[in-house]
Amino acid sequence: MSTIQNESNLLTSISEEQILIERSRMIKILEIIEQISWLHQPIVVRLFIEKTCFKIPQDWIIALKTLSDDQLKELPLSPTTKIKDNWPNSLKDFLINSQELS
């Protein structure tokens, strides 16, 4: 069987529902990337020059300062991360979305 036939068979075996689910996931991923563009756009060397760390929302910093080093290392993808009620909604949304999409 040729590669083209294999790809064609694969595409026909994917349901429309699966395509919609994957499309929805991709849109959500792009939204997250856009929301935190301040974090990933500059190249590493420019992080210091552009003072990217100062672009982290102050309310995130206050919330994250309460975590231990080990807890911070687990963010954002660890399913054991306990999201606290008093954290800013933007931080909670980021963590929930990151965990769902990981």
Image (tube, rainbow, N blue to C red):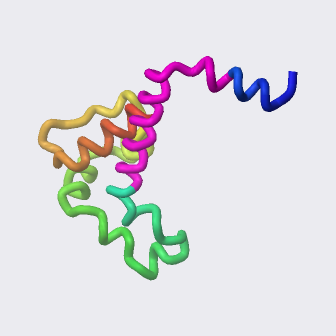
The vertical placement of 70 against 2, above or below, is: below
- To which quarter of the image does residue 3 belong? top right
Residue 78: x %, y % from top left:
42, 33
Magenta stretch in the rendered image: 10-33
Q: Is residue 75 highlighted in magenta?
A: no
Residue 28: x %, y % from top left:
37, 42
The vertical placement of 48 against 7, above or below, is: below
- Residue 70 visible in the shown view: no
Which residue lies most toward the right here? 1
Q: Residue at x 67, y 23 (%)?
A: 10
Q: Residue at x 37, y 57 (%)?
A: 34
Residue 77: x %, y % from top left:
43, 37
Residue 58: x %, y % from top left:
20, 63
Main secondary structure of the magenta stretch? helix
Q: Residue at x 46, y 67 (%)?
A: 41
Q: Is residue 31 left or right of residue 17?
A: left
